Image (cartoon, rainbow, N blue to C red):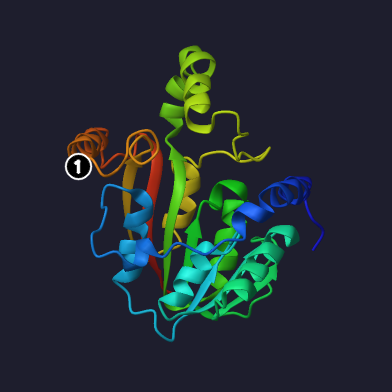
Amino acid sequence: MTLSPRQQREIDYHRDYAASKAAQKLVPVNFDVIEDEKRRPQNAFWSTYDHLLAMDLRGKRALVPGCGFGEDAIRLARLGASVEAFDISPDVVEIARRRCAEFGYGGVNFGVMPSEALSYADNSFDLVLFIDILHHVDIPATVREIVRVLKTGGRVVGNELYTHSWMQKNLRESWLVEKAIYPAMRRFIYGDDKPYITPDEHKIDETEFAAVESACASFQAQWFNGLVGRLVPDRFPAVASVDRAMMRALGPGGRYAAGRVVFEGVVLKD
């Protein structure tokens, strides 16, 4: 497959990113999200794993697109799945492989490929897990490939950045947010560090999200504000309950807001 300019920019960006994070990422994976009995339903990432923990993944084949440094693929293997994971960046995948070798993590096979052209056979997987990848890719092309490699009845679980188009145009792109609030938040969150934002990434909107939803025979989604767990620690239940109430008010369930969406769907094929 000939790479598009966008795909090549992703590879170039992650070559430098992997080099800058090599020592930081070559550390043990944190398994709290699958082992801690006290759950955090107000946190989008933990809620994603609540979906996964409700499944029996033992002996199932799972696919992790855009696997990065391998954390989620390794966690799925810890839950008993046989995992295939891939990324478009060979430099990132190399660190994931080294990580598994260093700490003895098994059950994961890593590959290098774009999500729009997978090398896996049809009807190969029981589960596909999207974590912060759809906003980097051609979503319709990726969804077509995911449907192809999933078995009928296979599940799609995800946790992605999301902004409704109205919210994006009228709030996020306003002068107040772009020139004042966002720079202040960026300094507060990152300090002197450079944010991990690739040249082409963007939060998916309701039209792009519909491409995922329409591929599924059944589908459920939860919307989360990005403040809890990012600016406000998610261990404060009172703040989290207010946050969830605010999201529900931006109905249905937060669809017209901005933040994160956690979803699960079932793919049925003829």
Return the x and y of residue 129 as percentages of the image width and height. Answer: 47, 64
- Residue at (29%, 64%) from the top-left corner? 36
Q: Is residue 7 visible?
A: no
* Image vertical order of residue 69 relative to residue 17, above or below: below
Q: Nearer the viewer, residue 236 or 43?
A: 236
Q: Quadrant of residue 59?
A: bottom left
* Image vertical order of residue 197 relative to residue 264, above or below: above
For this orientation, the residue located farthest to the right is 2
For this orientation, the residue located farthest to the bottom is 59
Q: Quadrant of residue 198?
A: top right
- Residue at (25%, 58%) from the top-left corner? 39
- Residue at (47%, 56%) from the top-left corner? 212
Mark 1 lies on a secondary structure that is helix
Return the x and y of residue 228 as percentages of the image width and height. Answer: 33, 38
Return the x and y of residue 107 as percentages of the image width and height. Answer: 54, 81
Query: What type is the residue that disc 1 sits on?
Result: Pro
* Image vertical order of residue 48 relative to residue 124, above or below: above
Q: Nearer the viewer, residue 105 or 165?
A: 105
Return the x and y of residue 178 as percentages of the image width and height. Answer: 52, 19
Q: Is residue 176 visible?
A: yes
Q: Quadrant of residue 127?
A: bottom left
Q: Nearer the viewer, residue 97 or 225?
A: 97
Q: Nearer the viewer, residue 20 or 181?
A: 20
Residue bearing the label numbered 1 = 237
